[in-house]
Amino acid sequence: MKYVAGLSFVFALMCTFVVADKPEAATDSDVTVLYGGGDLTGWAGRTDLWSAENGEIVGRTSDQKPIDGNTFLVWQGGQPDNFELTAQFKIEGGNSGIQYRSKVVDEQKFVVAGYQADIDFSNKFAGILYEEKGRGILAQRGETVTIDADGEKSKVRFGDADKLAASIHPGKWNDFRVVANGNHLQHFINETMTAEVIDEQTEKAATKGVIALQIHRGPAMVVRFKNIKIRKLK
């Protein structure tokens, strides 16, 4: 009987740990809708490049009026720190991305610097973690990268870049999920992790900042975003 009672106690203890490890369910107060349709109220960017169409944010350039530098549509709702951001995107040519924990460096031209969840039509860079106007590519697709205090990188490959690209669909709608929790950053496209960074270079790592959407200089392009939400992590 003592043996049975002991097993019961261990089982109960294990159950307690399992329950404790489950993430808390999001409440309405944890989730903020950055864009759920309608106009571009709450966002700031070049009005000749960004518009709201059919419940989507649309960024569009043309060969007739090429832009001379990357520009962004910046969410005006604050500077989130630890969060899970979800959005749907569709790109038709060119390059784009979702900026997070970033800063505006030119308010007139809407230029932003910081972490970027990369998107591109060629699928060469889609899913990587890039630092705009900073340290450049921090993690290629399929890499977990730890950046130490001196900026040195340790890389572990968890997936093949080309195989991961096969699950990303240019010209069609895709789901992007960005998780930023402390110095741990993760990108997921269509629920497959594409890149991961542990950023221990405290002098350059960002702990909070603006959210923004990118239009990249270069050939004419169209990028669309919808259903953009952010959930605060506790």
Image (tube, grey):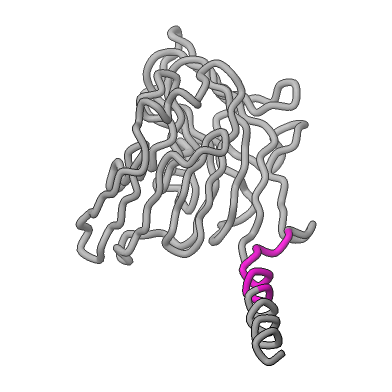
Residue 64 found in image quarter = top left
The residue closer to the viewer here, 193 or 68, is: 193
The span picked out in magenta is 15-25
Position in image of residue 110 (x %, y %): 48, 38
Q: Residue at x 42, y 30 (%)?
A: 164
The residue closer to the viewer here, 159 or 125, is: 159
Question: Eyeballing the image, is 224 above or below 25?
Answer: above
Question: Eyeballing the image, is 140 above or below 95?
Answer: below
Position in image of residue 162 (x %, y %): 36, 26
Position in image of residue 142 (x %, y %): 36, 39
Question: Eyeballing the image, is 87 above or below 185?
Answer: above
The residue closer to the viewer here, 73 or 29, is: 29
Left or right position of 55 against 74: right
Residue 47 found in image quarter = top right
Image quarter (top left, top right, bottom left or bottom right) of the C terminus: bottom right
The residue closer to the viewer here, 214 or 49, is: 214
Left or right position of 46 against 195: right
Q: Residue furthest bottom?
A: 2
Asked whether the viewer can see residue 11, the reply is yes
Q: Main secondary structure of the magenta part?
A: helix
